[in-house]
Image (tube, helix red, strand yellow):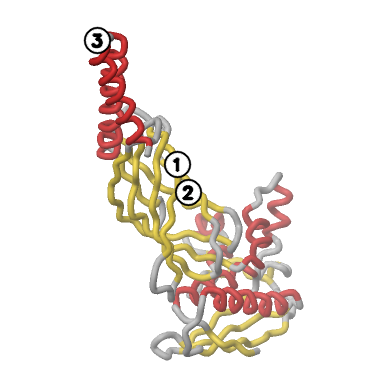
Amino acid sequence: MKKILLLILAAGTWYLAAMYESRLLLGISMTGIIGMLVFFVLPKIQIRLFSAAFSEPTRLMTRRTPDHVPVKTLKKGLFPLPNLKFKVAVRYDGQQKPEHRWFTGGCRMGQDQLELPFQAPYSGMMEMDLLMVKAYDPFRIFSSSRKADSRIKIAVLPQILLEETQNRERPFSNERQQGEQQSLRPGEDGDLRQIRPWVPGDIPRHVHWKLSARMQETMIREWNEEDRSVSTLTLEREKKEYTEQEADLYYEALCQEVLNKLAENALVQVIWNDHDGIPMEKEIRVKKDLEELLIYLFDSRYLWEGRL
């Protein structure tokens, strides 16, 4: 609509200038035509000197929590790009047809990364494809687009895990708080029992790095753990199609069941069979272990029935 109005205005001014032989109107008309040509060509030049792609192949998010998706930009021109639009396709596992969305943004001088605001509606594994980038002139009248080919996989965790995620990412104010937090790690809630050489299966964060450097051998710190009961959770494949809403409720219920057991100071032993029928198991001591299990279940592309 803006383009049509500008064309009518330029043509009308030119007509009046010719009718009344007015140099002023002729100058205004010529200025408008030249400006339109500049605004028409500018986005085409800018988009040829610009490319964008997701900054990372995978990312973690929490359901219904404001977040962003980082986009790495490459700008060869000398001028900023204040008016950009990004077209992406969002699809959860199991969805046949992706949902297309547009995001607006701008690229300043010297800026090499943008953040697309995003809020995931459901839990599960989500794929986001960057399909197109569109550049506009300063008045957003003319535009030019360029295809993009970039994908990111986003593991959307249930909202019930948000509090633990925030606590884990919160910076410490001093070394004393760091020491208190480290003492709460799994396997470190008792007294130090011994320091021994590393064997396959040991947890990497239990490595005593300073002693290992002196002895030229990987040494492991071992603690006396408090007695904790063990609950077994068996997961079996549920052979049916499901919607995003059903998957969301399922992951919330699974997390709640496991978190209740952890609150009772119990270890949760999860057992399941993979795609090839090979028995698998994972011991859940803290919420971080639960997040790792959820990411595996997201990648499995089907839900599981669980029983304790």
CA distance for labels 1 and 2 = 7 Å
Helix, strand or loop at disc 3? loop
Q: Pointer 1: what residue?
A: 105
Specify the amino acid type for callout 2: Leu
Q: Quadrant of the C terminus?
A: bottom right
Helix, strand or loop at disc 2? strand
Specify the amino acid type for callout 3: Glu
Q: Is residue 182 left or right of residue 50?
A: right
Specify the amino acid type for callout 1: Gly
Helix, strand or loop at disc 1? strand
First reached walking from the N terminus: tag 1 or tag 3: 3
Residue at image position (51%, 82%) is 303
User: For residue 307, what is the image quadrant?
Assistant: bottom right
Q: Which mark is residue 75?
A: none
CA distance for labels 1 and 3 = 45 Å
Pointer 3 and pointer 2: residues touching (CB < 8 Å)? no
| Depicted 89 relative to depicted 308: above or below | above
CA distance for labels 3 and 2 = 53 Å
Q: Pointer 3: what residue?
A: 21
| Depicted 76 relative to depicted 167: above or below | above
Residue at image position (66%, 65%) is 185
Q: Which mark is residue 116?
A: 2
- Foreground: disc 3 or disc 2: 3
